[in-house]
Image (cartoon, rainbow, N blue to C red):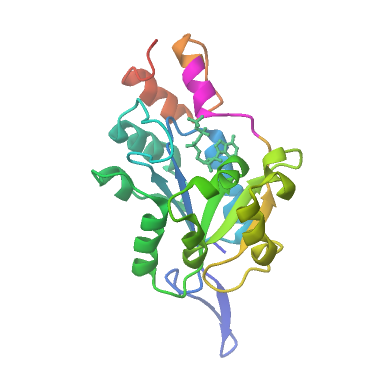
Amino acid sequence: MGSGERQAVNGTAQVAPRSAPHHAIGVMGGTFDPIHLGHLRLAEEMAEALDLDQVRFIPAGQPPHRDMPRTSASHRLEMVRRAVAGNPRFTVDAREVEKPAPSYTVDTLTALRAELGPDRPLWLLLGADAFAGLPAWHRWSQLFALAHIVVATRPDADAARPDALAAALQQELSHRQVPAGSATGPAGAVVFQNMTALDISATRIRAILARQGSVRYLLPDAVLDYIHQHQLYPLP
Ligand code: ATP
């Protein structure tokens, strides 16, 4: 309910303030090198399915789980800003980019939880590939105490099949997985939610740009303009 929940008070419909504690917030992390329509569509569809009040895009500074992105954090941040402009539910959080040291998701969620208070439902938005890789994340099992997790899946994706997941993750799922709409409380549930399959990756976009091909309609025009303006992703 993006614009506030209607409640009947003395027979009159009132709009609850957006800061009401039960309003759920989504967290969409990524390298965003560059941000593309797969990321944006994931956030949009999960926000709709879970009735999220807000989705915070948090570009990674120095991602600990993968090679350093070639594109500077300030360019990646600016591309995210341009991509989400115009969507009132989407916001950008620069905290990881602004930190000199590597940021771990568990630390970012701990900070967010301290800011938002113990009761606000917090949802970590993950693609199925990212969820399958969760056991490699720093202090990953502590994530469940901080947030719910929604895994954006496509019906044919192997990564979403529970039997394809690491045993430790299957173990967590056995007592945390609930149907969409049944999660209660501020954290601790895992929901699998289908999304429109968009076979887009930043890796592929960088490869197409490197051979000077067209990436139009794979990412927002405003991001493409920025890429051209700053001559990002040149030939290696
Ligand atoms: P790269 O190709 O550089 O690895 P990427 O396109 O996978 O990048 P990331 O920034 O690594 O993007 O991903 C951030 C999040 O977005 C992850 O949770 C990932 O699963 C998800 N994601 C990325 N692309 C898609 C897509 N096409 N559809 C759904 N989810 C996606």
* Residue 64 in sight in this render: yes
Give the main secondary structure, helix, strand or loop, of the magenta stretch. Answer: helix
Q: Looking at the picture, does residue 11 appear above or below residue 228?
A: below
Where does the image place residue 178, in percent across and percent down from the top left?
69, 64
Where does the image place residue 81, in percent across and percent down from the top left?
37, 40
Residue located at (65% from left, 59% from top): 171
Which quadrant of the figure contains the N terminus? bottom right
Q: Looking at the picture, does residue 20 appear above or below residue 195?
A: below
Q: Nearer the viewer, residue 75 or 170?
A: 170
Residue located at (36% from left, 34% from top): 76
In this image, 93 relative to 120: left or right? left
Which quadrant of the figure contains the C terminus? top left
Q: Looking at the picture, does residue 214 appear above or below residue 105?
A: above
Q: Looking at the picture, does residue 17 appear above or below residue 110?
A: below
Residue located at (31% from left, 35% from top): 73
Q: Residue furthest left?
A: 100
Where does the image place residue 164, in percent across and percent down from the top left?
70, 44
Where does the image place residue 166, in percent across and percent down from the top left?
63, 48
Q: Is residue 52 magenta?
A: no
Q: Nearer the viewer, residue 60 or 81?
A: 60
Residue located at (34% from left, 48% from top): 103
Q: Residue furthest bottom?
A: 10
Q: Nearer the viewer, residue 60 or 68?
A: 68
The quarter holding residue 172 reads bottom right
Q: Which contiguous range is marked in magenta?
A: 198-207
Q: Residue furthest front?
A: 167
Count every numbered label the image shows and give the total: 0
Q: Residue furthest right?
A: 156
The quarter holding residue 199 reads top right
